[in-house]
Image (spheres, rainbow, N blue to C red):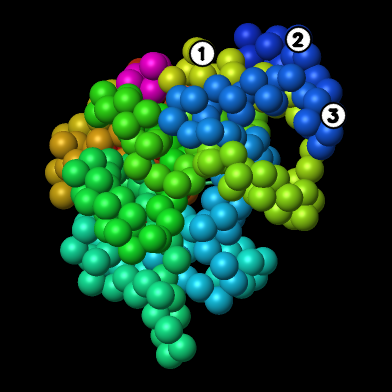
Amino acid sequence: MVDLRSDTVTKPTSAMREAMLAAAVGDDVYGEDPTVLELEHRVAGILGHEAGLFCPTGSMANLLGVRALVEPGEEVLCDVQAHIARAEMGAHAAVHGLTMRTFPSHRGLAEFDQVAAIISPKAGPYLVSTAAVAVENTHNFGGGTLQDLDQLRAIAELCAEHELGFHLDGARLWNAAVATGIPLLDYGRLFDTVSVCFSKGLGAPVGSVLVASAERIARARVWRKRLGGGWRQAGMLAAAALHALDRHVDRLADDHANARSFAAAVADRAPAAVDPDAVQTNIVVIDTGERSAAEVARAAAEQQVLVSALGPRLVRAVTHLGVDADGCRRAGEIVGQLL
Ligand SMILES: *Cc1c(COP(=O)(O)O)cnc(C)c1O
């Protein structure tokens, strides 16, 4: 079976499980878990921030990161396909009372002009005030796309000028850094709050980290407990994330190469379905044309290839450390044949 539904399907390797077993632990609500503290400190350093907060999910890290910048009744701006807008079950509104407004984008890519056209800082008594802007890198529903660093810099300046917060949903920021060669620090420093995930391509079973200033993280820690996210001997999970940082970041380049070879094998048989040159990281979006995506996914599954039907005519395949080059190429041949 070649499972390309998502990079969240990865399972911890035996070396990772050993690291988890060996972890020093303590009660993290008391701030006494040395492995959690090490992870938080290390990720904050990598991204150029003062402090970090280990969270069970990326959704919670985003929820806390945005809340650190936006008060109830204010708005955060993001693109129409953003994970925070589409895939976090309305938590930002349901839990924190924030509103969101979205700007249009091509494949999730944030552009200065689109953001500048709709910001509404300190809007007074008639209009909702914009308090923050959020972007996603790489962009999930955009198809693993890479944000342009110059655009990010320009938006960061715009935010600073208007005293708006700038949040990065960096669930797959690791992929962006490996694909572009741009250091994580250069991305991280542009933002006030950054979330990163360990449970996607990095292969840990659970976990995300939010980084920000020490003061914002202190407040986010209160909110995490309020949400029921105060956990205890979480060091066993932090150990998996530390192991992933040491062993599973550079190898993301293999996932990117495998995604391209999957796309090339599809395009050889169905050229209209995908442009292999548009594949920037580990996500491939396929246009199923006349065929229904659900039907293509079902037929592929019969041949031991799992992909996601994300829309009526849209199939998504995601490479990760649980699949190899041969498997990805073969999966591409099978999906291309079906199309
Ligand atoms: C997966 C993902 C998250 C977090 O998801 P969880 O399932 O809550 O860990 C956040 N943003 C993006 C872009 C993602 O792909």
Which quadrant of the view contains residue 292? bottom left
Please report contact status of discs 2 and 3: CB closer than 8 Å, yes or no. Answer: no
Q: Is residue 235 visible?
A: yes
Q: Tell me if 330 is positioned left or right of 234 in this view.
A: left
Instruction: Say what amino acid the circle numbered 2 marks.
Output: Ala
Disc 2 from disc 1: Cα separation = 16 Å
Residue 117 lies in magenta, yes or no? no
Q: In the image, what residue occupies the spot 61% across and 63% down? A: 91
Residue at 27 percent of width and 27 percent of height: 182
Give whichever of 40, 95 is nearer the camera.
40
Q: Which residue is mark 1?
A: 246
| Residue in view at x 59 percent, y 72 percent | 72
Residue designated by label 3: 27
Q: Decide: marks 2, 1 in contact (CB < 8 A)? A: no
> From the viewer's perspective, is 319 left or right of 92?
left
Q: Nearer the viewer, mark 2 or mark 3?
A: 3
Near-viewer residue (260 or 28): 28
Q: Is residue 251 magenta?
A: yes
* Most common SS among magenta residues: helix
Question: Residue 264 at what x, y percent from top left?
Answer: 20, 32
Give the mark, 3 or 1, whose residue is nearer the N terminus.
3
Q: Secondary structure at mark 1?
A: helix
Q: Secondary structure at mark 2?
A: loop
Residue at (23, 71) in percent of width and height:
117
Spatial CA span between label 3 and label 1: 24 Å
Give the answer, above or below, for where 283 lies relative to 87.
Answer: above
Sequence-first disc among 2 and 1: 2
Which of the two discs, 2 and 3, labels the residue nearer the N terminus? 2
Residue type at numbered disc 1: Asp
Residue 190 versus residue 254: which sits nearer the camera? 190
Q: Which residue is mark 2?
A: 22
